[in-house]
Amino acid sequence: MTLAMVISLLPAMALFASAAAWDGHTTTDFAGGDGASADTAYQIATGEQLAWLAAKTNDGTLTTTLKFFKLTANIDLGNNAWTPIGTTSHPFMGTFDGNNKTVSNLSINTASDGEMVGLFGFTQSATIKNVGVESVTIVLSGGNCYAGGLVGYAHSGSTITNSSAAGSITVGSTSWVGGLAGYIYSAQVNGSNANVTCGGSSRYAGGLVGAAEASSTITNSYASGSVTGGNAATTSTFAGGLVGYTDSSQVTNSYSTGSVTGGNVPAADSTYTGGLVGASVNSSLITNSYAAGSVTNGSVTGGSVAAYAGGLVGAVDNEYTTISYGYWKTGTASAGIGVRGQDK
């Protein structure tokens, strides 16, 4: 038997071993490129280099504005503690092309208040595209946090395209949680999806996005993970299969298939649960979209304030929200819209 014949009989994986998981350290440079254009993007091939991007962005020594970054290999973060890329002081403002690669085993666990977490923490005027984040595990016990598998808080001008997230996220009180992005403000999500179990003590919870405000748009996207609304002590809660809450924003050609369970709130507040959107207000628009998952209404402890649930939307404000060609699975709730005339 010739050497060539022996080699041909070996399992393919023996010849092409996968890259080692990240060990929690950073390197001191990228794999190549100067970041000046898409053709010369900074190349990221390892967890060390991805952590280098986070470290240099967050301490302000790397200016990401109009810079380009590109994954050249799948990256396994090994469930080591991940520091998200971008902060409010130093947002990620560049273009990140995942090159249809994946980042897996992302893990974040913190008790601090006000955290913005995901692969990216805070982005502004950024473009994130063609990347999948797999086996996400995020646990936040602090309050007023923003959590998403890909982005915690996508701010003005940020765009997420052809990207996905899968895993589980649990947040602390009065927080925003979404399978892909926790909160988008004047930002866009296009052609993206999430299969993330979202729960905890959130105020806003959505299978794809926790809340979308300020002319944000969600287009050609879907969510399949289960969503559970928060058990809030002092505020109303919103849970939707795709988005927890929309304010002056649009959902188009999108859908959700995961189950949605409303939260529990005190007597002075309300809970809103929708198969697609928890509540939609202030000139929001829902077009050609549907929900197919089960919907379980939340509850109010004491008092006369009701809990509202709809197969499509938990609540809309009569004068401003427009729903055109919206569908829901019969039997998931007593009505497509839980209540009209609400603006919370």
Image (spheres, rainbow, N blue to C red):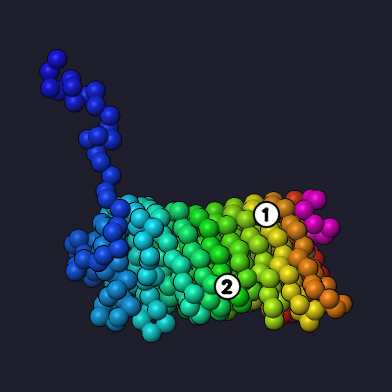
Return the x and y of residue 228 as percentages of the image width and height: 66, 62
Residue drawn 18% across the image and 20% down it: 5
Vertical position of residue 17 compared to residue 87: above or below? above
Which secondary structure dominates the residues rendered in magenta?
A: loop
Give the quarter of the image for residue 78: bottom left
Q: Which residue is mark 1?
A: 259
Left or right placement of residue 76 versus residue 172 in this view? left
Q: Is residue 141 magenta?
A: no
Q: Is residue 334 magenta?
A: yes
Q: Which residues are magenta?
A: 330-337
Using the image, tell me which numbered label, if any, was put on residue 91.
Answer: none
Does label 2 or label 1 sit earlier along the sequence?
Answer: 2
Could one spot residue 40 in this view of the protein? no
Return the x and y of residue 199 as percentages of the image width and height: 61, 63
* Front position in the image: 11 or 232: 232
Left or right placement of residue 100 versus residue 239 in this view? left
Discs 2/1, front: 2
Q: Which residue is mark 2?
A: 172
Q: Are marks 2 and 1 in contact (CB under 8 Å)?
A: no
Residue drawn 35% across the image and 57% down it: 77
